[in-house]
């Protein structure tokens, strides 16, 4: 059985009278990509900052490979790599100098040059080593930061909104690097995101977090299945007849009429559609169309919180801050 | 955990690399005092035909003061520049590393002091080459003492800059800071006129609580052998300021968070 890389229990952070993190508990297994998913202002960054030792906590406990993070800060710091939400590079220095600085701060002495050129290669910046960071695009900076976070061979890598503000193609590249690090180095990765797609694509398990609390934890599949599976729509002119034929069948969880056909909720829509087609065919019912909708994490989020993740009032504010910091 | 010495060296190295890359900073920090020397020094000196004491011409008197000014500006802004590191996020990279908070303070002081003192020495060379301070004034002990004063002064003001950076978070306060702290400190330091019993009591009193006063008096005493106090008093004053402010900066940074 894989051991736990991180155990967070009843973690609380208060800023004055405002409770940003309100009793969060979760465990992350070694080698896992674990996602903290929630809207801006949900407490994701605050949680990560406490685990990464740069923010004090109000109460609770954090263990990282058996190290008590809140007491033995320096021991914990050697174990973690972190990519912050806002860029944290020295723009005046070159890519190589930024990585060299990091290696020195973490006492990486053996094979330092090889390690630095390897991580630069890993994120596709091998030919940009001697360029000043201020000439880099947002995506290149993020890749460089991911490379930097990995130089001292941390046991856990934290990625705080790794693709925020990046274009779709760059985002896909970054996902690829993250997967590569996870696969090839069995690196435990914790990432925060408010992109449902990102959590779905990358994470082995997800904790949905809202108003400083975890409201559900599970694999993306399990979370989606908890909603009750796929929705199949059938377009037909003889909907009453088809309704009678399908009602009560084992694969049908629920069935209702729509204006031009039927809407069926089922476990696995892709297997159910041919069955329905066969039933219709042998009863001389013409089917005009079929569509199927898999529930997305977005649906899970809406069903758990009662609102859309992108509709957050805090969102625009946090975005503004984000870009403000990049000037 | 990375040793304090390694960490201080790493942070020092970063300051050096940044400085080497920034030509405008080099020209700016060295050029400003030379402009002061050329305009204020020559202007005031000839307008009033000042002779500070017996044979010392005004230019020779004001040159050590402008060396002190260079150190004041260069150091305090280097300390305050931590605000930029915070703004651009780089401070987090430092705060999350397995290094002591003390080494962050000492690293910044080591780097900025090196730059400030090197700039001051370049000005000193120019002053000597142009004969503003006659070569016959220089002694080995004098130069060594002046460098010691410069190092202590620079450490003091980098620390003051760090303290300010830890206490204020916005860059807008910067201008206020310059007007109400840095400029008065400069004018009260005795850089442009001697602090002596001839001054009104309030002015004399204010000068005596200005850390830069002891520094410039010491540098001046070491270089042109003219000062308000004997060197040992200036030495104690300057060293005490360094200990107090570096200590205070170290204490403040112990509690700094990466917000």
Image: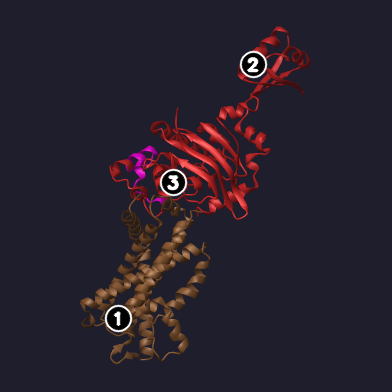
Chain colours: A red, B brown
Which marked residue is nearer to the observer: mark 2 or mark 3? 2
Mark 2 lies on a secondary structure that is helix
Which secondary structure class fits the magenta region best? helix
Total of numbered circles in the picture? Answer: 3
The one of A143 and A20 positioned closer to us in this rendering: A20
Q: For the point 38% across and 91% down, which residue is it?
A: B48
Left or right of B100, for residue A292: right
Q: Which of marks 3 and 2 precedes in the sequence?
A: 3
Q: Are marks 1 and 2 on the same chain?
A: no
| Residue A8 belongs to magenta span | no
How many residues crowd mark 1 within 10 Å: few (<14), some (14–19), many (20+)? many
Residue A143: x and y in percent read 43, 42
Q: CA distance from mark 2 to mark 3?
A: 47 Å
Q: For the point 36% across and 89% down, which residue is it?
A: B46
How many residues crowd mark 2 within 10 Å: few (<14), some (14–19), many (20+)? some
Left or right of A103, for residue A140: right
| Vertical placement of residue B54 versus B166, above or below | below
Disc 2: host chain: A
Q: Which residues are magenta?
A: A116-133
**Residue A40 in view (yes/no):** no
| Vertical placement of residue A127 versus B35, above or below | above
Residue A3: x and y in percent read 45, 32
- Residue located beneath label 3 in the image: A141
Picture quadrant where residue A80 is located: top left
Disc 1: host chain: B
- Residue located beneath label 1 in the image: B231
Disc 3: host chain: A
Left or right of B19, for residue B209: right
Q: Which mark is residue A272?
A: 2
Mark 3 lies on a secondary structure that is helix
């Amino acid at each position: 059985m894989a051991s736990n890389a991180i155990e967070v229990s009843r973690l609380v952070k208060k800023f004055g009278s405002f409770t940003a993190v309100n009793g969060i508990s979760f465990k992350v297994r070694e080698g896992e990509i674990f996602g903290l998913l929630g809207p801006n202002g949900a407490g994701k960054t605050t949680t990560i900052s406490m685990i990464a030792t740069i923010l004090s906590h109000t109460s609770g406990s954090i263990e990282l490979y058996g190290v008590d993070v809140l007491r033995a800060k320096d021991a914990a710091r050697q174990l973690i790599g972190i990519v912050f939400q806002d860029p944290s590079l020295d723009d005046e220095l070159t890519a190589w100098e930024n990585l060299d600085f990091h290696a020195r701060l973490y006492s990486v002495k053996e094979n330092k040059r090889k390690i630095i050129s390897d991580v630069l290669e890993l994120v596709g910046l091998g030919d940009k080593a001697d360029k000043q960071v201020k000439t880099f695009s947002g995506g290149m900076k993020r890749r460089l930061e991911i490379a930097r976070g990995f130089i001292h061979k941390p046991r856990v890598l934290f990625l705080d909104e790794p693709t925020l503000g990046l274009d779709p193609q760059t985002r896909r590249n970054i996902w690829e690097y993250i997967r590569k690090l996870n696969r090839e180095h069995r690196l435990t990765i914790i990432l925060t995101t408010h992109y449902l797609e990102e959590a779905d694509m990358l994470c082995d398990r997800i904790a949905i977090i809202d108003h400083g609390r975890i409201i559900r934890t599970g694999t993306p599949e399990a979370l989606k299945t908890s909603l009750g599976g796929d929705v199949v729509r059938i377009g037909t002119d003889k909907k009453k007849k088809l309704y009678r034929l399908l009602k009560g069948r084992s694969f049908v969880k629920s069935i209702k009429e729509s204006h031009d056909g039927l809407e069926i909720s089922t476990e696995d829509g892709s297997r159910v559609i041919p069955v329905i087609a066969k039933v219709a065919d042998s009863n001389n019912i013409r089917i005009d169309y079929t569509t199927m909708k898999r529930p997305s994490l977005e649906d899970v989020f809406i069903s758990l919180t009662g609102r859309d993740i992108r509709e957050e009032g805090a969102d625009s504010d946090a975005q503004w801050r984000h870009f403000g910091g990049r000037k | 955990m990375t040793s304090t010495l390694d960490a201080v060296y790493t942070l020092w190295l970063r300051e050096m690399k940044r400085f080497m890359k920034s030509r405008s900073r080099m020209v700016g920090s060295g050029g400003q005092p030379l402009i002061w020397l050329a305009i204020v020094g020559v202007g005031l000196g000839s307008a009033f035909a000042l002779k500070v004491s017996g044979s010392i011409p005004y230019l020779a008197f004001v040159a050590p003061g402008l060396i002190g000014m260079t150190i004041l500006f260069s150091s305090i802004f280097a300390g305050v520049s931590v605000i930029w590191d915070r703004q651009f996020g780089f401070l987090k990279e430092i705060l999350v590393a397995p290094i002591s908070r003390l080494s962050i303070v000492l690293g910044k002081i080591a780097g900025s002091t090196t730059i400030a003192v090197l700039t001051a020495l370049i000005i000193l060379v120019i002053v000597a080459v142009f004969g503003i301070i006659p070569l016959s004034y220089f002694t080995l002990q004098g130069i060594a003492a002046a460098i010691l004063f410069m190092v202590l002064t620079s450490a003091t003001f980098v620390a003051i800059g760090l303290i300010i950076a830890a206490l204020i978070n916005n860059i807008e306060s910067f201008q206020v800071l310059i007007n109400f702290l840095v400029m008065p400190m400069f004018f009260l330091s005795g850089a442009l006129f001697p602090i002596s019993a001839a001054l009104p009591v309030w002015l004399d009193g204010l000068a005596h609580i200005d850390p830069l006063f002891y520094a410039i008096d010491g540098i001046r005493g070491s270089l042109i052998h003219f000062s308000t106090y004997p060197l040992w008093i200036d030495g104690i004053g300057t060293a005490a300021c360094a200990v107090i402010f570096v200590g205070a900066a170290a204490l403040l940074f112990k509690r700094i968070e990466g917000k």
